[in-house]
Amino acid sequence: MSLDTDALRLFVRAAEMLNISAAGRALGMAPAVSSAKLAKLEQSLGSELLHRTTRKVSLSVEGADFLPFAREIIAQEEAALAALGKQTTTIRGTLRFAAPSSFAQLYIAPILPTFLKQHPDLTLDLRLSDVQFDLIEGSFDLALRNAPLVDTSLKGRKLADDQRILCAAPHYLDTHGTPNTPAELANHRLIAFQNRQPRPLTGPAGERAIFDPASAKGQLIIDDGQSQVCATLAGAGISLNALWSVHDQLKSGRLTRVLPNFEAAEDNVLWLIYPKSNVLSPKVRVFMDFLIAEIGAKPPWEK
């Protein structure tokens, strides 16, 4: 059975927009044509991919299962044409990208106009949250993760190292004192990110310690990185932060590094990841290359 790749593109766009007519218009099809083309695709597959009512369109169970394969077929076609030198130089379509909101606000959003100017026919669908999305279930083309790459169903390219350090506002330390050893953290208010799980620390000679909010004098739990930085600046306590999120405040003196010889022991890296089964499509490749050139080549927080 052969599949109409134009119909697959229509299905993928309709699944993203949950609007068949709008998806068709985005691909240059009249509403009647797009409805007929999608119906023909469903007939050839013997499955309803999208549920339609007079009020809304939703993805069926079969449609959700088929969607990643439809994306891969389209990517395979693009990659094959590119290998033969027949791929158009214009990058089109929609790129679904998930990233931590804190990092995106600081480093990705400011450079998006440059990327969009280079690729005006590409639509970026950004989902930004410090709570991680499931890359495959969410049908994302690409995601930024600031955690070890352990999922064997994913592939990735390194964007930059992700050093984690302790810091506090100077006026907090003036009031509550500055800890000189990791053990003294228990006498302070600690700000925890998302949960109170202990985080291992390592010292200059490899000595081990713990950042343990649950055992501290007081705790504050926050699930948003920028809010954690704001709370630390306000004097709410000592927090463990990615260096990229606080380097400007450290440079200006608004924050002070606490226990400067210690940092998080985890080997954290900022990864650009994508599903392992997918061919790396031109739209994903150009966005990855752009982020690595603009951010990863010379990370601003490492200057």
Image (tube, rainbow, N blue to C red):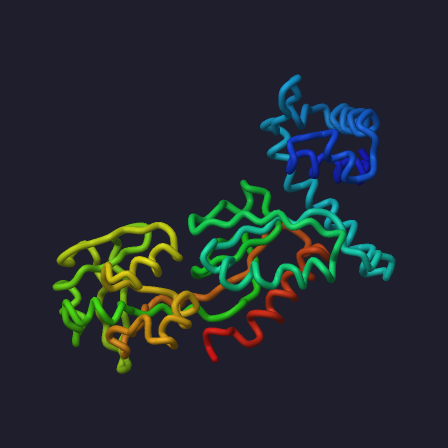
> Could you say where residue 269 lies in the image, as x and y percent from the top left?
46, 66
- Name the foreground residue: 1 vs 58: 58
> Could you say where residue 181 lies in the image, as x and y percent from the top left?
17, 74
Q: Quadrant of residue 286?
A: bottom right
Q: Is residue 248 left or right of residue 105?
A: left
Residue 158 vertical placement versus 260 (above, below): above
Q: Quadrant of residue 139?
A: top right
Q: Residue lying furthest bottom in this view?
A: 205
> Could you say where residue 158 lies in the image, as x and y percent from the top left?
54, 67
The residue located at (67%, 28%) in the rendering is 49
Quarter occupied by the N terminus: top right
Q: Quadrant of residue 205?
A: bottom left
Q: Is residue 133 left or right of residue 21?
A: left
Residue 46 vertical placement versus 106 (above, below): above
The residue located at (33%, 71%) in the rendering is 254
> Could you say where residue 121 lies in the image, as x and y percent from the top left?
76, 52
Q: How many marks?
A: 0
Q: Residue lying furthest top in this view?
A: 54
The residue located at (31%, 71%) in the rendering is 255
Q: Is residue 153 left or right of residue 11?
A: left
The residue located at (73%, 33%) in the rendering is 22
Residue 192 vertical placement versus 175 (above, below): above
